[in-house]
Image (spheres, grey):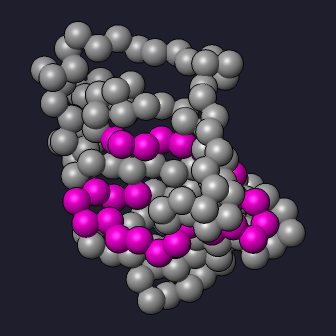
Amino acid sequence: MNMMQKSQKVTMICVFLRIDFEHYQNITTMIKNSQDIHVETVENSGNIEGRISKKIVLTPAEMMERASMFNIITLPPGSRIKEHPHIEDAEIYYILEGEAEVTDNDKTAVMRAGDVMFTGNGARHSIANHSGKDVKFLACILRM
């Protein structure tokens, strides 16, 4: 692929993702070391049933407010994130470890490491750990 084709491909991706480079002209790259990543535990609160651990990889400010969450979530056995909708945003679950039962509107499925789920446009989803081992997944909420 020549430079012109690469440039056109990058431009198409940026248009698809609605990236406005003028808005980000003063942004530099960021490297965040693991000791700088905050971890919090949430138990029986809101959509959380049981206890989860959230590794807050990037904050909304660090993502220039284009996303409201970029976390690695650990879902211990017996815990779940109850069904909830994504109306003005979208959420991606990417399973890193373990096996989880998910709902996608009215459909139930099992997801394993390497599987991904996208929920947006008013759709509802949930995730539960019915196995005997922790489930780890990347959760990213994109602002639409």
Q: Residue furthest bottom?
A: 106
- Residue in the picture at 28% in, 38% down: 66
The kind of secondary structure the magenta stretch mainly shows is: strand
Q: Is residue 128 above or below residue 3?
A: below
- Residue in the picture at 22% in, 47% down: 16
- Residue in the picture at 35% in, 71% down: 85
Quarter assignment of residue 135: bottom right
Q: Using the rendered image of the protein, determine whether residue 111 is visible from the camera's viewpoint.
A: no
The location of residue 125, given as percent across then percent down, is: 45, 73
Camera-nearest residue between 2 and 76: 76
- Residue in the picture at 33% in, 75% down: 123
The location of residue 81, given as percent across then percent down, is: 56, 66
The location of residue 132, given as percent across then percent down, is: 86, 69
Report the magenta residues as a range.
Answer: 67-91
Q: Is residue 113 above or below residue 66?
A: below
**Quadrant (top left, top right, bottom left, bottom right) of the N terminus:** top left
